[in-house]
Amino acid sequence: MWQGLTERLQNLLSRWRGRGRLSEEEVENWLRELRLTLLEADVNLRVARQFVNQVRERVMVPEVLEHPNPYRRMTQIVYEEMTKLLGEKPEPLQISPQPPTVFLLLGLQGSGKTTTCGKIAAMFKKQGKRPLLVAADLKRPAAIEQLEQVGAQVGVPVFAMRTESPEALAQAALSHAKTNAHDLVIVDSAGRLHTDDELMNELRRLKLALRPHESLLVLDATTGQDAVRVAETFENEIGITGVILTKLDSDARGGAVLSVRAVTGKPVKLVGLGEHLTDLDVFHPDRMAARILGLGDVASLMERVESVVDEATVKKMEERIAKGTFNLEDLLVQLRQMRQSGPLEQLLSFLPGFSGLGGPRLQIDERKLKRMEAIILSMTPEERRNPDIIDGSRKRRIARGSGTTVQEVNQLLRQFKAMRDTMKRLAKAKLSDRDLMRLFGGF
């Protein structure tokens, strides 16, 4: 995500490393570069200007210009202002105390709206809800089939009926939900390649009939300012309560995520970070600001790993890390569990120093991971528990048994030792044993 934006922001901020007193002139030049960086990332012009003005107000004061560590202070200010721009705090989806809760999803064709319906259903089903998916595209029969496929993947029923009346569909869907004890109704509305009067009229009628608790606009983050313009249109024509940004993991510039709230006044509530039906996260403005600035998002990484790591394993690894006895058997277990939480290159993007990297710079060959597993499995239990005893003859035997080379065995052992050293360094930085276990479970 945002390779160019993150790198340029990091370069701008690192300019102040090791500096003492700053002059107003050089800070003004720096602010000009900051604005250009945002514009090149496809951030809305008005939003870029407002953001830079907010930063200017806070940095053009003696407290900052004469600060003994201007790099740290400037980074803190940019981070805080970016967090404000993105919304300051997460705004979760609203659940009605009187079921069924109704979510109406809006968006253009190709934005990922139907898949997002399935992701939301999967998210709330995991929380104990009984969701119902509703196919509400009255003109495109293929849309019903697509939603039924998504529903089958997440194990959620789909309601559909042939009608040209949004009102009739809404009434029938709500009645079906109540009769069958569904406490959450997720409506996949009509989508077209572009907005038009016919579509907007149909959506207005559907919304009026459903009276949804949330009207959520699904936007493709990779379309930048086009997504922001679509958001303005839907807010003015239909009215929305929030935005869901999809394909954020493929967004190279970041213009949509930085602009949409400021332009529409509506919060980003969820973000899609992958193709899997579990790749949907609550939007945390502070965490997103940290990732954009290359500061990482360890909190989100922990949450993702927690969803697949069982508590017994957590406790066991806590003890091993605390005693310094973490070994290759533990690494093998954690490799397997971490892979369940998503592609490893995506998980690495949550770490400081990796945020914003993408493409070939952050690609992990899953085949290599399988070869690593094969190498560990070809060791004896004693060797996995104490890799320091693995000498040349043992390495040759392990390489033959795993169908790999001695060089690959050596590489794995070096990586494992480097990982243990890093864990020790982070332990000194006061991360808890539990956080260390979760963070390094899949490396």
Image (tube, rainbow, N blue to C red):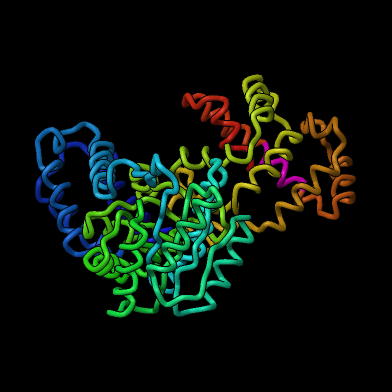
How many numbered marks appear? 0
Residue 340, image x and y in percent?
65, 48
Q: Can I make out residue 221 in this image? A: no
Residue at coordinates 41% horizontally, 53% vertically from top-left? 102
Q: Does residue 188 appear to the left or right of 365 in the view shown?
A: left
Residue 427, image x and y in percent?
53, 26
Q: Does residue 76 appear to the left or right of 103 in the view shown?
A: left
Residue at coordinates 69% horizontally, 25% vertically from top-left? 316
Q: Is residue 368 magenta?
A: no
Residue at coordinates 82% horizontally, 31% vertically from top-left? 389
Label the magenta part by its dominant secondary structure.
helix
Q: Does residue 318 appear to the left or right of 353 in the view shown?
A: right
Comparing 381 with 261, the one in front is 261
Q: Can I make out residue 398 in this image? A: yes
Comparing 372 with 258, the one in front is 258
For the N terminus, give its image quadrant: bottom left
Comparing 218 with 308, the one in front is 218
Range covered by the magenta-colored residues: 409-416
Comparing 179 with 328, the one in front is 179
Q: Where is 425 relative to 201, above or below? A: above
Q: Is residue 415 magenta?
A: yes
Residue 246, image x and y in percent?
43, 61
Residue 382, image x and y in percent?
85, 30
Q: Quadrant of residue 306?
A: top right
For the C terminus, give its image quadrant: top right
